Amino acid sequence: MTNITQAFERISNWWYELHYSRIQKRALLILGTLIIVSSSLIVVSGNSHEVVAPPVVAVQIAAPEIFVDVTGAVTKPGVYTLAANSRVIDAIKAAGDSAPGADLSTINLARVLSDGEQIYVDETIINSAGKRISKTVHSGPINVNRATAAQLDSLDGIGPVIAKRIIEYRKVNGPFATVEDLQKVSGIGTAKFAIIKSKLRV
């Protein structure tokens, strides 16, 4: 009780010693009272509502797609939409899988496809000697992306070794974009390409 009395006396002495007029002291007292009351009300009636975080909305990013033309010995030839990084086997399956008599030996089924590419599945038959041959009869320039090893071998200066290299290049790198790209195959120089260029097409 003594401590409270002493504290009250100190406050009273401090109050009377202020160099303020009576009006200023009264205004200060009112302002202090308002601040204390307002603070008390804020503390007592504090917001007790639970803060709910806004729901997290999952944003789905559409996977990139490519368009591929599948033709030849497949069940349903046509243009198909596939996911990016799809492989040749996926395109053939999208076209209803290979048709009876299809020759998949000239195609790299594991190669990754590119947008706008055409996949051609050759048709084959077995001749009287029991040898598998191309069923398609080719006339005019040879399509470097569809030609068999035997057809490539028939070109001047292209023997069975280089013909095999061309087939392997197609399997690994995909179709030739232009006939000039044939020069990327080992063994086909500028001179040799100039001789066979007129007999080629893509």
Image (cartoon, rainbow, N blue to C red):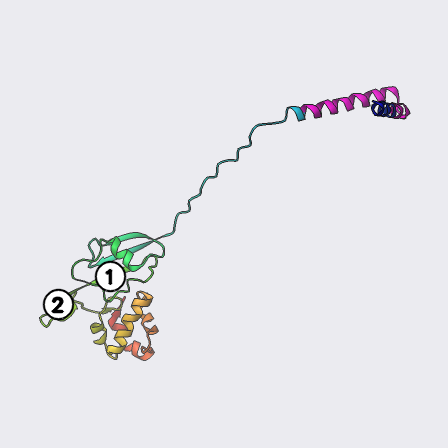
Name the foreground residue: 179 vs 92: 92
For the magenta stretch, what is the residue range? Answer: 12-41
Q: Secondary structure at mark 2?
A: strand
**Residue beneath the point at 34% across and 73% down:** 184
**Residue 97 placement (x, y as % from top left):** 22, 56
Q: Secondary structure at mark 1?
A: strand
Circle 1 Cα neighbour tier, 10 Å, few/some/many (<14 / 14–19 / ≥20): many
Query: How many discs appear?
Result: 2
**Residue beneath the point at 27% across and 60% down:** 119
Q: Is 34 colored magenta in this rendering?
A: yes
**Residue 17 placement (x, y as % from top left):** 91, 25
Q: Is 113 colored magenta in this rendering?
A: no
Determine the CA span between mark 1 and mark 2: 20 Å
**Residue 90 placement (x, y as % from top left):** 29, 56
- Against 32, residue 200 (above or below) is below
Give the quarter of the figure containing the N terminus: top right
Magenta segment, principal secondary structure?
helix
**Residue beneath the point at 26% across and 73% down:** 198
Q: Which callout, 1 or 2, points at the residue further toward the start of the chain?
A: 1
Label 1 sits on what residue type? Tyr
Residue tagged 1: 120
Give the quarter of the figure containing the C terminus: bottom left
Q: Quadrant of residue 154?
A: bottom left
Marker disc for residue 126: 2
Name the foreground residue: 179 vs 84: 84
